[in-house]
């Protein structure tokens, strides 16, 4: 997400940090900047399956949730959860997801041909059935 869009949530997380930890505390925050693009990446987690709704706010049954890949547009709903113990930080706990524009794929593993590359022998048997079925003593 571009930093300008992410800033309000980043500011809220920093406020939760200020309210719950000392200024000198090393606190893990649930966001980072992508080194290549500069976009902000939020780490959101949940122990439970979130509820899904479509762009109109209608619930999506669990078996109808679309398969989504990178580039899908979603809105997430949840809470900020400060923690401390062996380490200190703030977690983003996911409770619901609104699917705005899912990007799906077909799982197709086909590629365009590359000239001069490795070509497997089609239909070649890489070992006889007899050899595959033999018992070997070790």
Image (cartoon, grey):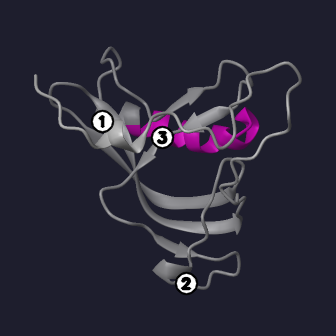
Q: CA distance from mark 3 to mark 2?
A: 24 Å
User: Relative to residue 81, is residue 136 depicted above or below?
Assistant: above
Q: Residue at x 43, y 30 (%)?
A: 29
Disc 1/disc 2 C-alpha distance (Å): 35 Å
Q: Nearer the viewer, residue 17 or 93?
A: 93
Check the image and report above or below for 116 versus 82.
Answer: above
Q: What stretch of residues is rendered in magenta?
A: 1-16
Is 43 left or right of 93, judged from the image as shown?
Answer: right
Seen from the viewer's position, the closer of residues 93 and 111 is 111
**Mark 3 element type:** loop
- Identify the residue under disc 3: 43
Residue 59's label in the rendered image is 2
- Magenta: main secondary structure equals helix
Give SS at disc 1: helix
Report which residue position mark 1 lands on.
20
Quadrant housing the N terminus: top right
Of the image marks 3 and 2, the number of the one nearer the N terminus: 3
**Residue at (37% x, 27% y) in the render:** 28
Q: CA distance from mark 1 to mark 3?
A: 20 Å
């Amino acid at each position: 997400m571009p930093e300008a869009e992410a800033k309000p949530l980043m500011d809220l997380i920093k406020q939760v940090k200020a309210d719950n930890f000392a200024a000198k505390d090393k606190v893990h925050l649930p966001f980072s900047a992508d080194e290549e693009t500069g976009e902000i990446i939020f780490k959101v987690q949940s122990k439970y399956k979130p509820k899904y709704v479509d762009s109109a706010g209608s619930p999506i049954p669990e078996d109808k949730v679309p398969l989504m890949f990178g580039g899908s547009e979603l809105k997430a709903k949840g809470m900020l959860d400060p923690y401390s113990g062996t380490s200190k930080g703030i977690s983003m706990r996911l409770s619901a997801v609104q699917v705005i524009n899912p990007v799906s794929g077909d799982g197709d593993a086909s590629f365009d041909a590359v000239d001069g590359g490795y070509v497997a022998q089609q239909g070649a048997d890489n070992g006889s059935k007899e050899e595959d079925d033999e018992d070997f003593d070790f």
